[in-house]
Amino acid sequence: MRILVANWARRVGGGAERYLQALLPALAARGHAVGLLVEHDEADPRLRIDDPAGGVALISAESLGPERGSAAVRAWRPDLVFVQGLENPALEQNLVSDYPAALFTHGYYGTCVSGTKRFALPAPRACARALGPACLGLYYPRRCGGLDPRTMVREYRRQTARRSLLPRYRAVVTGSDHMAREYAAHGVAASRLFTVPMPPTGMTPDSEAPGVRPATGRVLFLGRLTSLKGAHYLLEAAPLAERALGRHFALDVAGDGPDERMLRSRARRLGVDASFHGWVEPEARARLMRGADVLAMPSLWPEPFGLVGVEAACLGLPTVGYAMGAIPEWLVAGETGELAPANPPTAEGLAAALVRALASADHLQHLRLGAWEGSRRRTMHHHVEALEDIFRTAAAG
């Protein structure tokens, strides 16, 4: 097949782009002609989704403009367009009108004004509402997003435009059952809705099971330093867990973002032994994972999947996180990590989950083995096979 993957950016910025970085060569290796359509093409060559040597045809809407970009797509003759997320609803409308199309839902695309699917007040809590006019009435009282009314109106219009295009897709693909329920609630028919669990993309499972080793006394946080990712809750939980365990542990914080200065200040105020590493390359990510006892994933929004936890599991690193969104689909309490209550999430609940994970060397080893075994059941090979079946059906109409 001739498969054109459409994404808003060429730069690797998060889990969705790491997924594409692994998917493109996997599709090409199966004999498909693969193209990449991007809205923004400003990526550093070291951080691009596509490998210049990988044989992926690039179409840049930014550099070509609307008319020449459309002509380039027509000239490429895709059998199917696989949309990952676009900023311009007009571009998306043109693609789904002119070609058989499938949508992969990395986030709350067309289902939430802010895209976070959670209320911030009176406490962080997942939202179960379907997108509609009532969302505008709740946006400020429940702090669904920021305080600029222009942003609220602009994003509402964009998300409702996206929702209006959902019936035009021949297939809507989700990476989790949680997201499948979200799109079913927004009217996507079961015959067009498919769940294909996400494989680890930035890591491959170790060839051998993790052996017994002494605890390192380190807890790893890996992600953007924003309020949604909950690192501030982890800093509050750390002293509580230390007192309950009767021993010291250190935090490694890997990532960057607007909250870094606040988090550094809070760590000093709370007396938390925290090292801030900034954004790290894949090799450094792996080293930090191998040096930690657990990964902390205290997300305060319903993660559509939570790819970093499955990547960590490849190296035998279990996860502690809140039971919100799709996280409980791969974080099985007592088997691959420990879950904290999420209704609402609290520092006390997260501390208790850390204590359960770290209190016993035998239990921690059990979690390490369970995480590794779980990662081996998720492979890119099986993921692509499932996508191929969906693509053939969608392309045939």
Image: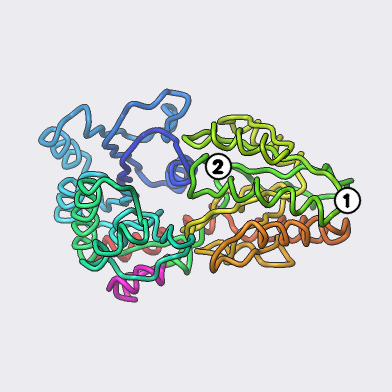
Q: Secondary structure at mark 1?
A: loop
Picture layout, residue 347 above or below residue 204: below
Q: Is residue 137 visible?
A: yes
Frontmost residue, 221 versus 201: 221
Extreme front residue here? Answer: 269
Q: Position of residue 72 (x, y in %)?
A: 18, 36
* Residue numbers of the magenta segment: 180-194
Q: Nearer the viewer, mark 1 or mark 2?
A: 2
Q: Quadrant of the C terminus?
A: bottom left
The residue at the point 40 percent across, 33 percent down is: 11
- Residue tagged 2: 223
Q: Position of residue 134 (x, y in %)?
A: 24, 68
Colouring convention used in this rendered image of the protein: rainbow
- Residue tagged 1: 212
Q: Is residue 264 left or right of residue 249?
A: left
Identity, as a three-letter code, of the amino acid under mark 1 = Val
Frontmost residue, 165 versus 80: 165
Picture layout, residue 390 above or below residue 228: below
Extreme top residue here? Answer: 45
Identity, as a three-letter code, of the amino acid under mark 2 = Gly
The residue at the point 18 percent across, 57 percent down is: 161
Q: Position of residue 116 (x, y in %)?
A: 39, 55
Q: Position of residue 104 (x, y in %)?
A: 37, 56
